[in-house]
Structures are given as structure tokens and as C-alpha cells.
Image (cartoon, grey):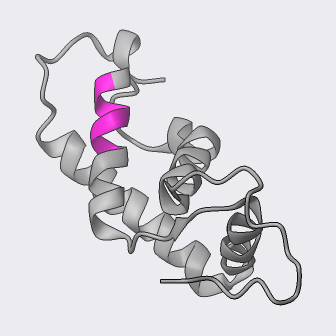
Amino acid sequence: MCIDNSEGMDFTMNRQLRNYTEDEVRGYLDKWFSEADVCHCDGCRLDVMAIMLNNLPPHYVVTDQGALYAQMDDFSMQHRVDMMSTMAMAAQIVKARPRHKPSSPSSSLR
């Protein structure tokens, strides 16, 4: 696919393929994971993140400008509901079937 550069835009700026949804899920977990009723170890956090990413649509971007367009969706109420409900569902799955041996509640739950 060829990009039309007739308007003189610089498409060479900071080009790197990334899944914006992954950045967004990581940000949501940074903000809300401490409130989830699930073990807070790194392994469980990664499991929650993986389940979320497998249940949310990917949003690939190549430039910073593409990431800005992707961020526009962050402001919709439906998008926020989807993120929170997906995190809650993922946390319940991980809580029900953690992939490590149970530890004392004070060491794994905050």
C-alpha cells in the first residue's frame, strides 16, 4: 500500500508498529489493578493483561499521530465501560484459577 504524500506530510517521524490497545490496557492496570479483588503478584497481573488483550480489539498504529487518533476513542463512555468490564472479567478468571500456589493473603492481596 502506498501512502499519498501529496500534502508534504513527513511520514518518516518515529515510525514503529505497536498495538495501542496494549498501551491502554497497561495504563488501565496501573490505575485500577490495585482495586481488583485478585492476587497482585506480577504473574497474576500479566495473566489479567493477557486475558484483557485477547478480549479487546487490537488497535495498531505506526506513528505518534496514529496514537493520538486512537486516544480519541478513550473519551467515549462505552470504551471506558468495555475496559472496566473486561478487566473485571479477567480478574475473576485469574482469581478463580491462579497459576501459582496460594500464599498468605497479606503477601499477595493488597
Q: Which residues are magenta?
A: 43-48
What is the x, y in percent for residue 84?
Answer: 50, 65
What is the x, y in percent for residue 33?
Answer: 51, 41
In the foreground, 77 or 19: 19
Q: How many discs mark residues in the rendered view?
A: 0
Q: Examine the residues drawn in magenta and state their main secondary structure.
A: helix
- 23 left or right, relative to 76: left
Residue most extreme to the right: 8
What is the x, y in percent for residue 24?
Answer: 58, 56
Residue at position x 74%, y 66% in the image: 11
As drawn, 16 above or below 98: below
As drawn, 22 above or below 66: above
Residue at position x 67%, y 80% in the image: 73
Q: Is residue 52 magenta?
A: no
Q: Is residue 47 magenta?
A: yes
In the foreground, 102 or 46: 46
What is the x, y in percent for residue 81?
Answer: 54, 76
- 69 left or right, relative to 79: right
Asked which quadrant contains residue 57, the reply is bottom left
As drawn, 7 above or below 8: below
Residue at position x 15%, y 44% in the image: 96
- 22 left or right, relative to 50: right
- 63 left or right, relative to 56: right
In the foreground, 20 or 37: 20
